[in-house]
Amino acid sequence: MRGGLAAFAATAAAILLFGCASQGAAPKAASDAPSVKASVPRYQPPADPYPSTYRPYPGVPTAITGATVYDGEGGRIENGTVVMVDGRIQAVGGPDTPIPEGAVRIDGRGRWVTPGVIDVHSHLGDYPSPGVDAHSDGNEITNPVRPEVWAEHSVWPQDPGFSRALANGGITTLQILPGSANLFGGRGVTVRNVPGRTVMAMRFPGAPRGLKLACGENPKRVYGNRNTMPGTRMGNVAVFRATWQRAVEYRERRARDPNTARDFQLETLVEVLEGRMLVHNHCYRADEMAIMLDMAREFGFRIASFHHAVEAYKIADLLQQRNTCAAMWSDWWGFKMEAYDAINENIPLVHNAGACAIVHSDDANGIQRLNQEAAKALADGRRMGIQIPDEVAWRWLAINAATALGIADQTGSLRQGKRADVVLWNGNPFSVYTRPQQVWIDGALMYDMNNPRLRPVSDFELGQPGEGDTK
Amino acid sequence: MKRLSLLLAGIAAFAAVPATAQTVAITGGRVVIGDGSEPIEGGTVVIRDGRVVAAGANVPVPAGAQVVDASGKWVTPGVVAGFSRIGLVEVDAVNGTNDTRANNSPFNAAIDVAPAVNPEAMAISVSRAAGVTRAVVSPAATNRSLFAGQGAVIDLGGDMQPITRARLFQYIELGEAGAGSAGGSRAAAHLMLRNALREARELSRPGGRPDDVLLTRADATALVEVLAGRQLLLVHAERASDILQVLALRQEFPTLRLVLVGATEGWRVAREIAAARVPVIANALNDLPATFEQLSATQSNVGRLRSAGVNVAIGMINDDEARQVRVSTQYAGNLVALTRIPGATGLSWGQAFQAISSAPAEALGLGGEIGSLRPGRRGDVVIWDGDPLELSTGVDAVWIDGVRQNLENRQTRLRDRYRRPQEGNLPHAYDPR
């Protein structure tokens, strides 16, 4: 590799592809004459390396009529019509909504239409099925500070979990995150739930990346067991603060002197400081979430959402004040001390306080049932007197999730001009007896329960027992 | 001394007899027997002396019975968790509270979970409030032996006597996990099993045990009951070929009473399982190739097994089995949902409810005791405010052994404390009870 690079760099027009800051001796230039400086072009990092190559698949003008429509923002239309043209929502309305000539018409009577479901916390692809060591790529457990790793560079696009999420869960968009072993887990990526040969072919165009942080038991247990910092919660916070301080100083240095050597760790954090990258913070306990919110203020960044947030109900008022979402489970609890105080009414209590509530999975099975988890939480809330209409609760799976991911302008609700990410359910989507009937992504029909041809089979499943089966 | 003996007498009396179970008649509800039959409108359930007297239409209400009006509600047997580790764990990650496995014990098959079950585990009160009344509780195997030990069936009642039947079954691993514990291959696991059964058989031979045994005397003794068919043998196997090997054990050991646990690929050898008349306790909704043992996983597994004539029940195997048995109703409802998906095979409502009530009971040989509202069964009854399998439904009342249960638990207490997150005139710690 070295020799090849030296040979390559010998060409006058060659561009050095590797930053030389930390990798040892740089390859020699074509000549060692003093004028060599002028002949080596300055390396300009591309603004978007690993760019999305995702293109919507072809669709046809389609109109669903007669359905109960949840627009994902809290609106409900009975006997509703949804029209999709050229990959976009063209119209959402009542039975008199105009339908283009020649559009495919789908009878939605007795059925519901919602925006495609969004899961803000998934490890599909980086902890895929089968769960073998060779594919265990979600946690770079070599240092608690790893903001330089990108989850998308671990994503195996052939994970069979993606198709289950589509067919059983109506999932059209998901954020794939690093795990929570590290304080700074790395960059997350938002993807379309459309099979691709490469992760770039799945990447949601224009979606901001996320930064995964984790507080609480996981980092201090992993590194404390190795007798390295952090070994305590106070150690967690100290390492967080020291790292954010380095980022603040790096940002100032780079602003003064653009020739400052690149640091991929701190570069990620500067993206956060400058508001281009959204922070998703795995955090369970109320007191720790409060500390993280103050830390965000200390260093001038925003936490877009807490994930898991098992005790969010205890600080629902604080979450509302600080405009921070909470992505939660309906009723998972008890596996760690920090999950011991979970209650079934967490999500509706957060919603009731005026804060942004989201239902997430963090699980390849749970992602197939986010609508069911939302239904349980909704019912538990009603039983304690928090009456939230069905169509308003659907925000937890739609616009709230899209907002946390910074893509609310593109998807997350059925609004004219947005991407046609649509699920036609075969009944009330808050019923256990309901499943997706058809799913469109960017107006292309990507799943149809009545058409075995539209049941994706990943490379891994080809030639295996059960290939092509209804899963 | 007198005070002590009175105290002891009081304790003995308390321990010997459960709280008085008076005669109860639950009337007007939609009654589900739990045997697969369809619900009965406007039925009555009568419980006396801790047992079901009768359930169905036209059941007379005994004089003097406490009448509970269940109009507009559903009345069912309590949910039976077909496979779990509930009561053995408080917080999984806190080792001192986790009694599912003993990685450094010299014993394996002899291990008996009964003394380890804590009826005050938070998971028990949480699950009781969701309508679960009995649970199959199994030890977990370690990486040193394919024998996990002896499991029990418990009730989830709010008293200090949880055990319904102790040492009801032996649990063993015969897939990848078993292979690992036997030294690294399935072949070694099968040899290890046969060797162990042979050592059990030779325990009573004249001249005592030979010198080169692998099992402790205690472990070999435990397997005598299994070999004789007096104790069930629950075998965890997922892969189709492994399942066939489990069924083949009966050719070598015809007295074994086998139950298959897991069986994610069971649908592919459903005919063989049905022919062997081996019951199956399966995860309801495995549909991912989570391991190479589960390549053909599909949610239609349970439905296809049932269609082929297999007696199949739902359990939670390696799936939050210590804390989340309450999702059994959600899982069962999902199996009904499959009946509306072309190409999928699901269960009818009655079959699905059976899979979480009488089917697990019968798989464990306790169909005469629990899991249904047939006459003579334990008085485990739940009143639901709607369809028990539907997500919006809540539990109104629970009886276990005919005793009305308290449905409050730590989660309800936390909920009530934090209805309003903000403090009032005093910190939350001072909130009135």
Image (spheres, coloured by chain):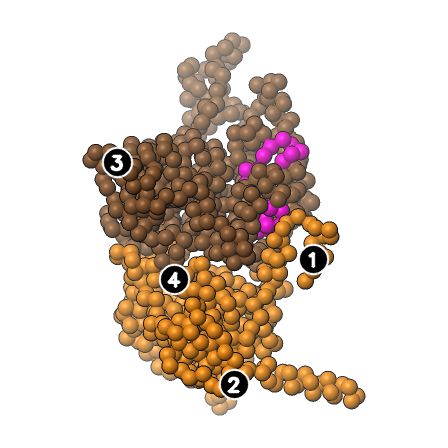
Chain colours: A brown, B orange
Q: Which mark is residue B400?
A: none
In the picture of the structure, the residue carrying the numbered disc 4 is B333
Q: Residue drawn 32% across and 43% down? A: A80
Say what amino acid the circle numbered 3 marks.
Ile
In the picture of the structure, the residue carrying the numbered disc 1 is B431
For the record, the magenta segment spans A296-316
Say what amino acid the circle numbered 4 marks.
Gly
Q: Which circle's residue, 1 or 2, is located before the other in the chain? A: 2
- The chain containing the residue under callout 1 comes to B
Label 4 and label 1: CA atoms lie apart by 39 Å
In the picture of the structure, the residue carrying the numbered disc 3 is A99
Quadrant assignment for the N terminus of chain B? bottom right
Determine which quarter of the picture holds residue B256: bottom left
- The chain containing the residue under callout 2 comes to B
Crowdedness near tag 1: few (<14), some (14–19) or many (≥20) residues, C-alpha within 10 Å: few
Say what amino acid the circle numbered 1 marks.
Asp
Crowdedness near tag 3: few (<14), some (14–19) or many (≥20) residues, C-alpha within 10 Å: many
Q: How many marks?
A: 4
